[in-house]
Image (cartoon, grey):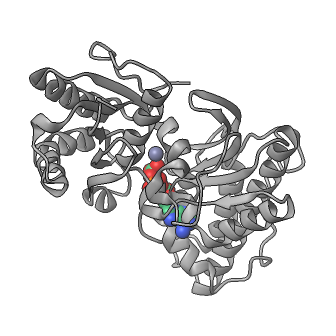
Amino acid sequence: SHLTPLLAIETSCDDTACAILDAHGALLGESVLSQEDHAALGGVVPELAARAHLKALPELVELTLQRAGLELEDIALFAATTGPGLIGGLIVGSSYAKGLAMACGKPFMGINHIEGHILTPRLPAVLRPDETAPAFPYLALLVSGGHCQCITVEDTGQYRRLGGTIDDSAGEAFDKVAKMLGLGWPGGPALEKLAREGDPQAYSLPRPLKGRPGCDFSFSGLKTAVARHIEPYGREALPRQVAADLAASFQQAVTDVMADRILNALALAPQVTSLVVAGGVAANSVLRQRLEEIASQHGITFLAPPLRLCTDNAAMIGWAALERLKQGEVPDDITLAPRPRWP
Ligand code: KG4
Ligand code: ZN
C-alpha cells in the first residue's frame, strides 16, 4: 500500500506505546513504556497517566523510528487510538499523532482500541511460521483491567457484541480481591501465584450469572462474598493458608463463570472456527487451560496472542489500521474527536 509504513500510537490507559508496521503487517519497530508509578499508587490515576504519556511520546516515537531504521518523513500514515479509554490519554496520543501527520502532510486514522485487541490474533507477529491467521468468524473473549466482553468477529469492521460486564471488569475483580488479600498491584499475577498454595474448593463462593442465558458477566457479588470471609479477621493479618484458599476459590469461581459464558456464546455463534482470548487476564493459566479444553471439545482452534501483544500495545492499533486500509477505507480522520466511550 502507498500508505505504509505506518506509525501507530496507543495511549488509552497507562501504557504509552508506539509501533511501525509495513504493508504486510510486519513490525518494523516497537516500543512500550509502562507507567510504573501507578503500582505505588495502587491503580491508574488518569491525570498522572495523561501527563506521563505527553512526557514519554516524543522520545518513544524517536526510539521506534530508530529501531525501524526510518526517518519521520518515511512514514506514510499516522494512526492512534481514539477510544474507548481515559479521555486525557486519548487526547494526548491522538493529538500527537495528528500533529505529526499535519507536519508531514500525511493522513491520520483514528482506531478503536477494542477493535485493535480483537484483530490482534490476525497479526503476522502472533503466528508461528506453520500457522495461518484465524479465519472469520471467530469468537473473541477480551478480559483485562479495562474490558470484559465477548464478541464475534465476523469480518473487519463487523463485530457482534454478545455480552459484557454489568459491573467490574475481570481484571478489576482480580485486582480488588488481591488488595483485600493484602497483595500488591496489579493483583492478578500475585493472586494466581498465591492460589497455587490454596484449595479451590475451600470456600464455596457464588458464580454470578452462571446458568443464566446470555453472555454477560458480573463480579461484584463474588468480590463481596470474598470480603465477608475476610471480615472475621478484622485488623489482623490474614493467615497465609486462608488467603491462599480464598485466592484459589476466587480464581476457580471466575473460571467457572467465564466457561459458562463462553459455552453460551458458542451456542449463539455455532459457526465460529476459533476461540481467541486477549487482555491481561488471559495470562491466567487456570482460565487459559479451561478455555483451551472448551475449544478442543468443540473442535475449534484456541488462540491466545503472546502476552506482550495481549495487553495494551501499539502494534494492534497499527494492524487494525492496515486491516481497514485493506477494506478500502480512506484515512481522513484529522478532525475526529477522541471518545472515552465508543460502543
Ligand atoms: O490488558 P492489561 O495489561 O491492561 C488493562 O486493560 O488495564 O490488563 C491488566 C489486568 C490487571 O487487572 C491484572 O491484574 C490482570 O490483567 N492480570 C491477571 C493476570 N495477569 C494480569 N489477572 C489474572 N491472572 C493473571 N495471571
Ligand atoms: Zn486494552
* Foreground of the two, 112 or 245: 112
Residue 158 picture location, percent across and down: 63, 27
Name the residue located 9 percent from the left edge and 43 percent from the top edge.
71
**Residue at 35% in and 22% down:** 338
Whether residue 333 can be seen here:
yes
What is the residue that sits farthest to the top in this orientation? Answer: 335
Query: Quick one: 48 or 342, which is closer to the camera?
Result: 342
Residue 235 image point, x, y percent: 51, 71
The quadrant of the picture occupied by the C terminus is: top right
Examine the image and state in which quarter residue 340 appears.
Answer: top left
Q: Nearer the viewer, residue 79 or 143?
A: 79
263 versus 192 height, above or below: above
For image coordinates 68% across by 66% down, the residue present is 287
Q: Using residue 45 as the reference point, say whether residue 322 is left or right of it.
A: right
The N terminus, quarter of image: top left
Q: Is 267 displayed left or right of 86 in the figure? A: right
Q: What is the count of numbered marks?
A: 0
Residue 302, quarter of picture:
bottom right
- For image coordinates 73% across by 66% down, the residue present is 292
Can residue 178 be seen in this snapshot?
Answer: no
* Residue 44 x/y as whole percent: 35, 48
Q: Is residue 262 above or below residue 107?
A: below
216 relative to 91 in the view: left or right: right
> From the viewer's perspective, is 133 left or right of 74?
right
